[in-house]
Image (cartoon, rainbow, N blue to C red):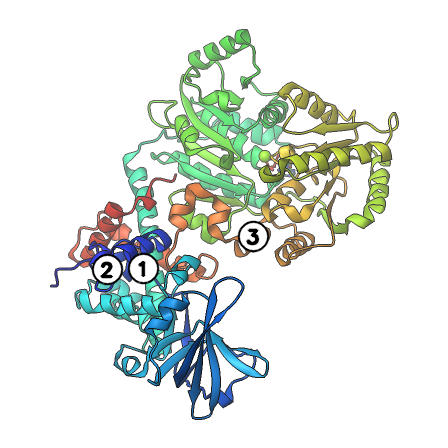
Amino acid sequence: MSQYNSHTPISYLQGVGPSRSDLLKKELGIRTYGDLLNFFPNRYIDRTQFFKINQLQQNSAEIQIVGKITSLKTVQQKRGSRLVATFVDETGTMELVWFRGAKWIKESLKINIPYVIFGKTNYFNRSFSMPHPEMELVVDYKKNMRTAMQPVYPSTEMLINKGVSNRVIQKMMQQLFNEIPRNMQETLSEEILEKQELISKKEAMFNIHFPTSHELLTKSQYRLKFEELFFIQLQLIRKKMIRKSKIKGYSFDHVGDKFNTFYKNHLPFELTNAQKRVLKEIRKDVASKAQMNRLLQGDVGSGKTIVALLCMLIAIDNGFQASIMAPTEILATQHYNSIKELLQDMDVEIALLTGSVKTKARKVIHEKLENGTLDILIGTHALIEDKVKFKNLGIAIIDEQHRFGVEQRSKMWRKNDLPPHILVMTATPIPRTLAMSVYGDLDISVIDELPPGRKEIVTAHRYDSNRLSVFKFMKDEIAKGRQVYVVYPLIKESEKMDYKDLMDGYESISREFPIPKYQISIVHGKMKADAKEFEMQRFIKGETQIMVATTVIEVGVNISNASVMVIESAERFGLSQLHQLRGRVGRGADQSYCVLMTSFKLSADAKIRLETMVRTTDGFEVADVDLKLRGPGNIMGKQQSGVLNLKIADLVKDGDILMSAREMAFEILQNDPSLETEENINIKRTYQNIHKNAGVWSNIS
Ligand code: ADP
Ligand code: MG
């Protein structure tokens, strides 16, 4: 064994001094031998082919040529100077040019000695030149470990400026492979290698940096992606298993009177098959002796509320209390009203608790909660306050969970002796691969079907120049008795301009839709809460026909008479936000519309977003496009980026590998939950190493 291991600081590597090691740390996060080893190329180029100067063509890709420098000159220019070399082979002459680092490069270049140069060529004044070529003496070129496919490593402006070119990184990699132990430890078990037909760790690591053939490169990539995803899944599944075995939950072992009466006599519609399936999944979960931790995904309008209510009735039938927490007062109130209506003929005690409930009323609620006469509590953040004590909370439901922090959610866990069952609901569809990586430790249910009879929302894209016809359309719909939303973007960075746009828009709509014939509400973030609420209520009651707003109306608001959503500057919204906004209409029986207003100037991505919105109303399809456009880190936000900080796998492209990795992880843990067998010794060691060293795998439930 060599004295070096993966924790050896990178400055120990031959050729890496203190300043370069600082640079590697800052620019690439590389601190140790292990970091460098796991720094993977993001593409490869073919270097089997050599060109002659007289074969060069305009706009060619990166190429390599063998030749000599015959002369060097420094040319003064406006700022600094550039270095120009005359480079010849037996077929012609070209120039090599450096705009930066001229002095340093000039000293290092040798005249009349054969070089291999590599780079992209420019064509100007009927001659070719190559700016900032990678250069290597032919003698060195022949000596070095080299293969047909040349790796290209991710780089930064700073690295290039400081002379750390791709070539330099390749050299460091070679040096690294000279120094590290030859028998690199295997991280997976024989069983996995065999079943998944994976090559060994050692072979994969070598070939990812120095591919000896296309085939081996492909196998190496597969092996390393599999490994990366496997250990993430292993951790998530293990966490889930531990929770299921260690954390006891309340068992709702029977379905009783309340549930049955409601189901038979008061359910206003038949459940969709998706709702029935999800309900079954939940029932099975809460009847086991373990605590449920389930994510319920369902597009806007898919009917999550009724599922939540039925779950709460099961809890009540088993002698427990239940709660729903929503992110805003409006939403909480809406839940309260609709559930109260559904339960009007039932003997179930229910209350609403929000920040604006007066002290006296609050006291009554607290009392009834503690003596157990209150069955269901619905509310906002007010629910998680320590003062709010339940006699016997059995299930806590959290709506639009992404609006709550982990911290807030975990407070619900402590509202009873054993943690209550937790059901988090979200209307933001998460692509499957992403859900399995981020919420892989939760159980996931999906309502993937809308209630029957819904009319698909008609979505259209219109340019600002068509505004008059859009106004006309709004008037026609209002004449039919409908209501209209007009939404403006509000982005922090351009807040001032955005408010101006909102106010300008409000004014022009006021002119176009004059009182008394039309009434307009306006709601935005700078208004006081009660003013907001007042305007909102006017719209809910139908006193106003148009609601001009910023994105405050995004979440969950359900006004079934509002059937038109006009989104201004739609090109500035993200896809999932557009989809969420569109979900505010299409709640009632009427045909609904969504109009996306934009200027003519659209980026390529914006075009794709708009086309996607016009093409489909399927939230999962929208989410898939969003994932492709923005990547996983941006979709899930900082909080989760740890798990998504993948070195080689790609959640967009490697869905199949992820599935195999998850199945394999599951199989392994089922047979050997604590990884104690001889067979799994490699896995256990690697798993422990990852945990010791990487904070990135922190808790994420
Ligand atoms: P979300 O999933 O967005 O929370 P809701 O629970 O608010 O959706 O339901 C949207 C609307 O659909 C409500 O008016 C609800 O009464 C209705 N609904 C829910 N399930 C069904 C069903 N199976 N059949 C008909 N209407 C339903
Ligand atoms: Mg809802």
Marks 2 and 1 sit apart, C-alpha to C-alpha, by 8 Å
At x 77% / y 51%, what residue is drawn?
A: 463
Instruction: Please tell me the numbered disc located at residue 211.
Output: none
Reading the image, the residue beneath label 3 is 626
Q: Amino acid at mark 2?
A: Thr
Q: Amino acid at mark 3?
A: Asp
Q: Quadrant of ligand 1?
A: top right
Which residue is at the far front?
Answer: 76
**Residue 658 at what x, y percent from top left?**
40, 58
Name the image quarter holding residue 342.
Answer: top right
Q: Tell me residue 510's x, y (percent).
A: 82, 31
Q: Earlier in the sequence, mark 1 or mark 3?
A: 1
Residue name at image x 43 percent, y 61 percent: 654
Note whether 83 is above or below 574 in the view shown.
below
- Residue at 25% across / 55% down in the picture? 18
The local crowd at label 1, few if under 14, some if 14 to 19, many if 20 or more residues have their Cα within 10 Å, is many
Residues under labels 1 and 3: Cα distance?
26 Å
Residue 12 image point, x, y percent: 20, 58
Check disc 1 and give the amino acid type.
Glu
**Is residue 432 visible to us here?**
yes
Q: Secondary structure at mark 2?
A: loop
Q: Dot 2 corresponds to which residue? A: 187
Say which label, 2 or 3, has the lower sequence index: 2
